[in-house]
Amino acid sequence: MKSCAFTIVAKNYIGLGQILGRSLHQHNPDIDFMILVADELSSLHELPCNIIMAKAISSFSEEEWMDMAFKYDLTEFCTCIKPTCFRHLMELGYEKVLYFDPDIYIFSPIDEILYQLNHYDMVLTPQIAGIHPIYSGEHPEWAMNVNGIFNLGFCGMRNSPVSCTIIDWWQKRLVDNCFADRSTGNFTDQKWMDWMPGFLGSESLYVFHNLGMNMAPWNFFERELYLEGEDIMVKYRTDDNPQRNDRLVFLHFAGYDYQQLKQGIISRKRITDLKDYKDLELATNIYRDAIVDQRTLFDEYILQEYSYGKYDNGTPIAAFHRRLYHGAIEYHHTNPFSTQKGSFYDAISKKGMIINERLDNLSRKNIQGLDKKKKMIARLFRFLFFLMGYKRYVLFVKSLYFYCRPELHTFLIKHPKQ
C-alpha cells in the first residue's frame, strides 16, 4: 500500500520542511513526502513537485479561507487546514498518510507506524508516556490538560471510512474553533484529539507508548538518550515506571532557535540550561549538523514574510485584532485585510487600536516593570474590595471571566445604539 508523509508550513519554513523530508527519506526512501504551504508565494518561484499550495487543494471557499487566514494567527491557521490536507492526500490514492510538524527530525525507520496502520485507522502519540507521581515536566500539568493529551506534531491515518468520518468531523470544528485559548479550553487542532479514545476505542485507535516516538521538550524530563552500538536509544529518565528501551524514531525540536542552529549553536527559548539534559546532544548535534549542511535550503525562503500577517496597507495585524474580528460578525462577509472606508480596519482605526507596538503577549519582554505593575493592579483590586464589599467583589471577580476573550469586546467598535 502506497504511503505518504506531509508537513504544513508558512513559506518561510519551506526549507525546514525540506530538511525534515530528507531525514525521512534517509531511513524510509519508499515513502512519498509532501510540503503543504499555508500562505501564498509569488509566481516568480518555481517549486519542486512535492511542494503544494494548500489553498489550491482545499475545499474551502475564498471567503472561508480569508476568514480563517485573518482570525487565526500563523500557528492556528497552519493547524486548522490539517484535516483538508489529509483528505486531499487520501483522495490522491494514498492508503496511509502521516503528518509531521516541520521542526521534527527522523532518526530511524518508521516501520512500526506503518505496521500499526495495517490494523488501526488512526495512530497518535501522547504528550507523556509514563505515570509520574512526582511530575517535573517543562509545562505544568494544568497546562498539559489545556494543551491536550496527544501531541499533534504527529498524526497517522489509514485511508478508511472511519478516518474519513473523523477528518470531516475535525475539519468542521477547526473552521471556528482552532484558537490557542486557555479560557475556552481550546488548543489549536490538537485538543480535539482528546475525543478520539471515546470515538474510536481500541479497535480503531492505536496510541504509541514507544519512547522513541515524538520525543520533545515537554517529555525530556521522562526520557533519556543513550547509545547502543550505532543506534540512539531512549529509556525512562526516572525510575517511577517499568523500564523499557526503544530506538529513537523522531524528535520534535519545538521551540529551538533555528537561526542559531544554522550557526552551529544549540539553543532553545524555554529550557535555558540544556546542560540538565546532556544526553540530548546525541540527537541535537545531528539536527544541528543537518541544518548547517543544508543551510542553503533553510535560507532560500526564511526571510519571506507571512502572507496573512498584514493589512493591505502594510500595517501588522495584532492578535487582539484577529480575535476582535472573530467576534464582530457584521464584518465576516467583507475582506478582513481591506483598509478601505467601512472596513473592519477602518472601525478599529477610528478607536485608536492601530499602534506601532506589539501587545500580543503579556510578559517581561513587552512590559517594563511587570512585577511592579502587578502590585499596582493588586492595590486597585484592594480598593475595589473596599468600595464593593465582599459579596459584590466576589461576583465582580467572577464576571471578569466574561471579558477575558477579545471577541467579547466588540462593543468597543460598535455605535452606542447598536
Image: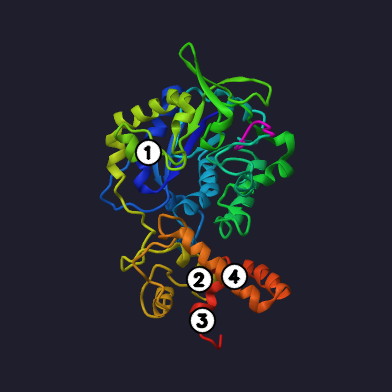
Residue mark closest to the camera, 3 vs 4? 4
Near-viewer residue (277 or 164): 277
Near-viewer residue (299 or 403): 403
Q: CA distance from mark 3 to mark 4?
A: 29 Å
Residue 132 belongs to magenta span: yes
Residue mark closest to the camera, 1 vs 3? 3
Range of residues picked out in magenta: 126-133
Which numbered dot is residue 332? Answer: 2
- Position of 391 with respect to 356 (left or right) is right
Element at label 1? helix
The quadrant of the picture occupied by the C terminus is: bottom right
Residue mark closest to the camera, 2 vs 4? 4
Tell me where residue 411 sits by quadrant: bottom right
Judged by its main secondary structure, the magenta piece is loop
Mark found first going from the N terminus, 2 or 4: 2
Which numbered dot is residue 381? Answer: 4
Q: In percent of the image, x 37 and y 36: which residue is there?
A: 18
Residue 67 belongs to magenta span: no
Q: CA distance from mark 2 to mark 3?
A: 15 Å
| Kind of residue at badge 4 | Phe
Near-viewer residue (157 or 20): 20
- Position of 179 with respect to 209 (left or right) is left
Mark found first going from the N terminus, 2 or 3: 2
Which numbered dot is residue 414? Answer: 3
User: Disc 1 vs disc 4: Cβ atoms closer than 8 Å?
Assistant: no
